[in-house]
Amino acid sequence: MTSVTRLSEVVDVVIGVDTHVQTHTAAAVEARTGALLGQVTVESTPAGYEELTAFADEHSTLRAWAIEGTGGHGAGLARHLAHAQEIVVELDRPERARRRHGAKSDPLDAERAAREAMARTRLGTPRAGGDRQALSVLLAARRSAVEAATLAQRQLFSLVIAAPEALRARFRGKKIPAMVATAAALRLHPSWDTETTTTVTVLRSLARRARDLAAEAAEHEKAILALVRAWRPDLLDQPGVGPIVAATVLCAWSHPGRVRSEAAFAMLAGVAPIPANSGQTTTRYRLNRHGDRQLNRALHTVAMSRQRYHQPTRDYTARRTSEGKTPREIKRCLKRYIARDLYRLLENPSPTT
């Protein structure tokens, strides 16, 4: 993120864009007076992006774009504007309270995007493409495969519990991986009744689905590891950081300068302490449930790994426990420290990286 005084001091016009799958709606607002200069709706195609640029040229060449969803519906427009070396500000979704007390339409949302960008003193830049976007795509595909495989395994387990005894006996005492292997190798027998035959057919289908999805997830992880090693192998040298954690951190961080400070990175990860003071109590903090939850989960994974295998972290845990800290409080502190260290490493890579 970049720190500025106000957009009104560096540009003449702010163009807010409300992005959708088929169309984008833009509103041009004069930066100094806040006057609405014009609105337009175009298709979300290269021709539509050129139309938006022509619309912006009608008002000022000294301008900034405030776009919602630069990593989603607005990704194509953000790439187009980046190629044209335009100033682009990334906005998250408008606050629900602000939308609830007024009308809702695409032109109004575009105008609100422009005015919200004008009101901010710290502006977010869109996340980078290239390797970061490739990692993001692979992470999404792997996550989907893992979740679908887990669901198939749970369904298989539930069906085994309710299966006829002759069939259930084959699975008794086995763990999930062994159950999947057993179910995938099941064969039908003519002597079985309809219930048993149907159950075997479904169990075999679920097991093979889970096995195929697990293999797909493993292939995605190999591709993720290759990208991380080529981009930032120094992350993999950190205790508790594997390819999935490293890729998640890189996707959230994106590029040098996007996140302005250690504190901002901690807030992005949802590990920054939130004061919960009351009366004479001035040292109380509560759990931060905001931020990038995938990044938060990655930091949690690192903390859990270090508490088990990293001796300095084990010593820290023992010391904080003796001071009266709860396990949850200790993990919260660890995640904050891990976020700090990773941010410093990302912003100041070693010369060999």
Image (tube, rainbow, N blue to C red):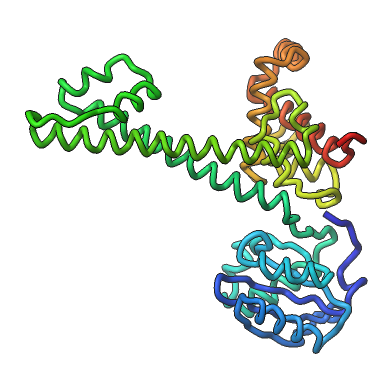
Q: If the image is split into quadrants, where does the N terminus sit?
A: bottom right
On the image, which quarter does residue 32 sit in? bottom right
Can you give x and y, in whole percent of width and height, for residue 172 in the image?
Answer: 27, 16
Residue in the foreground of this view, choosing between 344 and 279: 344
- Residue 1 against residue 265 in the figure, above or below: below
On the image, which quarter does residue 196 sit in? top left
Asked whether residue 175 appears in the rendered view, the answer is yes
Q: Residue at x 22, y 37 (%)?
A: 201
Residue in the foreground of this view, choosing between 160 and 352: 352
Residue in the foreground of this view, choosing between 332 and 351: 351
Can you give x and y, in whole percent of width and height, for residue 86 in the image?
Answer: 82, 71
Can you give x and y, in whole percent of width and height, for residue 213 in the image?
Answer: 44, 39
Picture mark count:
0
Q: Residue at x 63, y 83 (%)?
A: 41
Q: Residue at x 65, y 81 (%)?
A: 48
On the image, which quarter does residue 82 sit in? bottom right
Q: Residue at x 78, y 65 (%)?
A: 89
Left or right? Give the position of 192 relative to 88: left
- Residue 55 against residue 21 in the figure, above or below: below
Can you give x and y, in whole percent of width and height, for residue 151 in the image?
Answer: 39, 38
Q: If the image is split into quadrants, where does the C terminus sit?
A: top right
Asked whether residue 280 appears in the rendered view, the answer is no
Left or right? Give the position of 158 relative to 57: left
Residue in the foreground of this view, choosing between 280 and 122: 122
Left or right? Give the position of 188 relative to 160: left
